[in-house]
Image (cartoon, grey):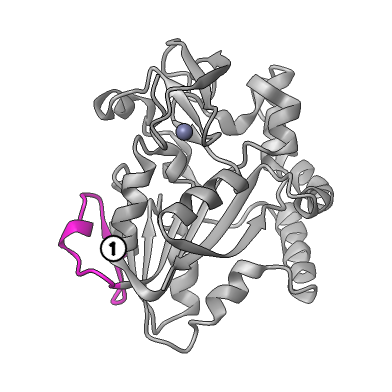
């Protein structure tokens, strides 16, 4: 097979599996890793048409909770946020702060149910927000003066050099041709704009520990899995410069992988509490760059 990212023909078999998360069907897919660029790809690569059925209406992006969790885990989240603030650890927030007094155009590409835009638009009333998600139909009710949502591809009709911040959170792993998308977004990104990409980390400890039970494999919705190293290299080749790489400090992927390893059919009631209690340990993982998810922030090369 040919690698979608670098077109190399040299690949190695990693594992095979089927849709164990949404359980749409039992079709087997193989995961191969490219020997050249080290990105993994699904084989056979589903077509755009085939992919539709793997996103049923109860898939997480539509059901993501917009309301706060129960009180106990809400308190834990509150304390976590407080500690992070005190230690100035939320780097993404700090990077966005740079734009706080400016009038900017913010695009959330693959915005799910609009949660991210909802949070940011309450903080930055001078920004103009654009949300795009091809699968979500329930975001119209979030529309306000500064916010517009699209579910059909509107980007080609937007001017070039238009967006100052483009957020791609949990998106590129779902795209058949990620390089093509990144190049389109680069065209639409302003000269001093930043691109934020959050995606699963193939180099994570949890991937190495849990293997085929790793929650972030999400076969067959995750078509490619990147690592901090190989994505940075690809972005460099596309003429982006790294500003920062952030490593997630949330144990949800580890905890869910653990359930999968032990074939737990239902999440325990105290799931949120377990995740919050284990979060301090993921701080160590993030320092070692072994987190299950990473976020790379880049700007265009000048
Ligand atoms: Zn490759």
Residue 207 in picture, x, y percent from top left: 68, 31
Which residue appears at 73% of the width and 49% of the height? 289
Which residue appears at 28% of the width and 72% of the height? 161
54 and 245: which one is in front?
245
Q: Quadrant of the C terminus?
A: bottom left
Crowding at mark 1 (Cα within 10 Å: few <14, some 14-19, many 20+): some
From this view, report whether residue 50 is shown above or below residue 122.
above
41 and 116: which one is in front?
41
Judge from the rendering whether residue 36 lies leftward or rightward of residue 180; answer left or right.
right
Asked if one can make out residue 255 in the rendered structure from this viewpoint, the answer is no
From this view, report whether residue 172 is shown above or below residue 239.
above
Report how many numbered discs are placed on residues in the image.
1
Asked if one can make out residue 29 in the rendered structure from this viewpoint, the answer is yes
Q: Does the magenta run of residues contain 158? A: yes
Label 1 belongs to which residue? 187
Judge from the rendering whether residue 127 lies leftward or rightward of residue 283; answer left or right.
left
Residue 12 in picture, x, y percent from top left: 55, 19
Judge from the rendering whether residue 132 lies leftward or rightward of residue 32; answer left or right.
left
Which residue appears at 37% of the width and 29% of the height? 56
Quarter occupied by residue 125: bottom left
60 and 44: which one is in front?
44
State the residue lying farthest toward the bottom: 101
Q: Which residues are magenta?
A: 143-162
């Amino acid at each position: 097979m040919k690698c979608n990212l670098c077109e190399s023909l040299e690949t190695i078999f990693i594992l095979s599996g089927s849709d164990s998360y949404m359980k749409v069907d039992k079709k087997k897919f193989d995961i191969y890793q490219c020997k050249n660029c080290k990105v993994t790809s699904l084989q056979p690569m589903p077509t755009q048409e085939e992919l539709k059925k793997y996103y049923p209406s109860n898939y997480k992006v539509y059901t993501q909770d917009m309301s706060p969790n129960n009180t106990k885990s809400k308190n834990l989240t509150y304390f976590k946020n407080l500690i992070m603030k005190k230690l100035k650890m939320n780097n993404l927030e700090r990077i966005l702060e740079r734009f706080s007094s400016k009038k900017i155009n913010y695009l959330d590409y693959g915005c799910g149910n609009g949660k991210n835009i909802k949070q940011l638009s309450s903080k930055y009333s001078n920004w103009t927000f654009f949300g795009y998600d091809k699968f979500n139909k329930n975001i119209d009710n979030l529309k306000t003066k500064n916010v517009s949502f699209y579910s059909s591809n509107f980007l080609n009709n937007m001017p070039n050099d238009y967006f100052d911040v483009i957020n791609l959170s949990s998106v590129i792993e779902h795209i058949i041709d990620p390089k093509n998308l990144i190049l389109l977004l680069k065209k639409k990104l302003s000269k001093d704009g930043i691109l934020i990409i959050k995606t699963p980390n193939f180099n994570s400890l949890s991937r190495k520990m849990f293997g085929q039970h790793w929650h972030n494999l999400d076969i067959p919705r995750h078509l490619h899995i990147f690592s901090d190293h190989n994505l940075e290299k690809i972005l460099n080749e596309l003429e982006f410069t790294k500003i920062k790489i952030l490593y997630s400090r949330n144990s949800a992927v580890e905890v869910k992988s653990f359930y999968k390893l032990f074939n737990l059919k239902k999440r325990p009631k105290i799931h949120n509490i377990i995740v919050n209690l284990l979060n301090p340990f993921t701080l160590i993982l993030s320092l070692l760059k072994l987190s299950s998810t990473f976020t790379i922030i880049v700007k265009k090369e000048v």
